[in-house]
């Protein structure tokens, strides 16, 4: 038996070796036995009070063994090597032309839906406004982003216009819909270039939605650890739809394939898995025998399905080939909405993508517009 300091040091040495730890999912690891001559692995599983191991040392002491320490060091190392991306609001302290800090406020630019502060640079003499991404828009950035927040958090287009009316902004529901289409397209093209740092276990599921009164199926691919919605697909059928495009898009989005894919027993999931994730030396394990309870369940996907179901009313006006609304909700789910199950963080936060600023919609739109111009 080893004391705690020795066990911790042994665990650190195990974690530094590339072939000693297998990550099944974020709650289940396998660590290779160090003192046995034959190939043997111990299961390290997360419990309500921390990790537990089935090795003799842990079973005897009921204290952290070297295998648990190895898993903890491995998780810490994996988080450190992930590339973190921070998207910040554009600076309002420098001239947009010469980057000088010698700028002053010079009145307001008035329009039908609000006023926008004007600035002048005392060095180059140019006048400008900090309005990147919202140029030539009659409504202010705050009005547009408020409308998007209301809509994707569950309000209908007409309810959004009623709220804006109370704020003194008269706009039609058609205009709000056009804002959503315009800015979702802009944000999508920008955010798709940023690679999220995802885990090695993904989940896939489908749910039915009514679109223009017709029954459609929304397929979703989600990361198990971060709950990041990786890819989507809308179809007319449930069991026969080819979901290979969604798996292929997910693989390109993450820059890798998972070690394990958890789905229900639908045959189209198995066919797509075999085509996209089972064609190399490192096959992805397909877990399709999920249950409502137990180690392999799809409760996380069901939770996201319920989240979408709660907001289905706001999506009732979309057509099958109109992906703006669903894509907009995917952006809202990943980058804007804080999740109670993630301790108030967004999936993007856990995937090492931080959106700064009080108005995250505005931050993303500004950066997407700036990136589109460069």
Image (tube, rainbow, N blue to C red):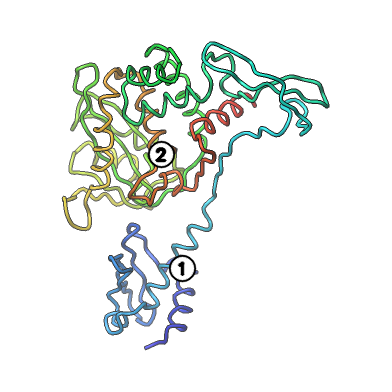
Q: Quadrant of the N terminus?
A: bottom left
Proximity of marks 1 and 2: CB atoms separated by less than 8 Å: no
The residue at which mark 2 appears reads as 334
Residue occupying image coordinates x 44% and y 75%: 11
Is residue 171 shown above or below 199?
Answer: above
The image shows a total of numbered marks equal to 2
- Quarter of the C terminus within the rendering: top right
User: Which element carries disc 2, helix, strand or loop?
Assistant: helix
**If you read the primary sequence from the N terminus, does the residue marked by circle 1 or circle 2 appear first?**
1
User: Between 225 and 289, which is closer to the camera in this rendering?
Assistant: 225
As drawn, 182 above or below 248: above
Mark 2 Cα within 10 Å, few/some/many (few <14, many 20+)?
many
Residue 242 pos. (x, y %): 26, 31
Q: Nearer the viewer, residue 147 or 235?
A: 147
Foreground of the two, 318 or 36: 318
Residue at numbered disc 1: 73
Q: How crowded is mark 1: few (under 14 residues within 10 Å), some or many (20 or more)?
A: some
């Amino acid at each position: 038996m080893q004391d705690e300091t020795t066990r911790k040091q042994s665990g650190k040495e195990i974690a530094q070796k590339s072939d000693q730890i297998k990550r099944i999912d974020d709650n289940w690891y396998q660590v290779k036995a160090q003192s046995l001559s034959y190939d043997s692995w111990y299961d390290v599983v997360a419990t309500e009070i921390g990790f537990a191991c089935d090795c003799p040392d842990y079973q005897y002491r009921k204290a952290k063994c070297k295998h648990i320490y190895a898993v903890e060091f491995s998780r810490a190392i994996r988080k450190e090597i992930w590339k973190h991306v921070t998207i910040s609001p554009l600076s309002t302290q420098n001239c947009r032309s010469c980057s000088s800090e010698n700028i002053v406020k010079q009145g307001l630019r008035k329009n039908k839906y609000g006023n926008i502060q004007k600035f002048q640079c005392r060095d180059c003499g140019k006048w400008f406004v900090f309005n990147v991404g919202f140029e030539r828009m009659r409504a202010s950035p705050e009005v547009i982003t408020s409308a998007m927040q209301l809509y994707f958090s569950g309000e209908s287009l007409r309810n959004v216009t009623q709220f804006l009316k109370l704020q003194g902004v008269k706009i039609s529901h058609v205009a709000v819909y056009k804002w959503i289409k315009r800015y979702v397209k802009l944000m999508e093209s920008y955010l798709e270039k940023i690679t999220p740092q995802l885990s090695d276990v993904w989940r896939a599921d489908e749910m039915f939605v009514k679109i223009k009164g017709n029954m459609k199926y929304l397929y979703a691919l989600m990361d198990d650890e971060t709950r990041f919605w990786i890819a989507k697909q809308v179809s007319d059928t449930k069991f026969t739809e080819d979901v290979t495009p969604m798996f292929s898009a997910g693989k390109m989005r993450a820059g890798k394939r998972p070690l394990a894919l958890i789905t229900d027993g639908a045959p189209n999931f198995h066919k797509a898995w075999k085509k996209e994730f089972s064609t190399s030396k490192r096959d992805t394990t397909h877990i399709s025998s999920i249950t409502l309870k137990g180690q392999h369940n799809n409760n996380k996907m069901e939770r996201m399905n319920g989240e979408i179901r709660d907001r289905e009313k706001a999506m009732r006006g979309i057509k099958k080939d109109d992906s703006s609304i669903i894509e907009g909700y995917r952006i809202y789910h990943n980058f804007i909405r804080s999740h109670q199950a993630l301790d108030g963080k967004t999936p993007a936060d856990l995937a090492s993508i931080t959106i700064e600023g009080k108005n995250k919609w505005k931050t993303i739109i500004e950066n997407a517009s700036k990136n589109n111009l460069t």
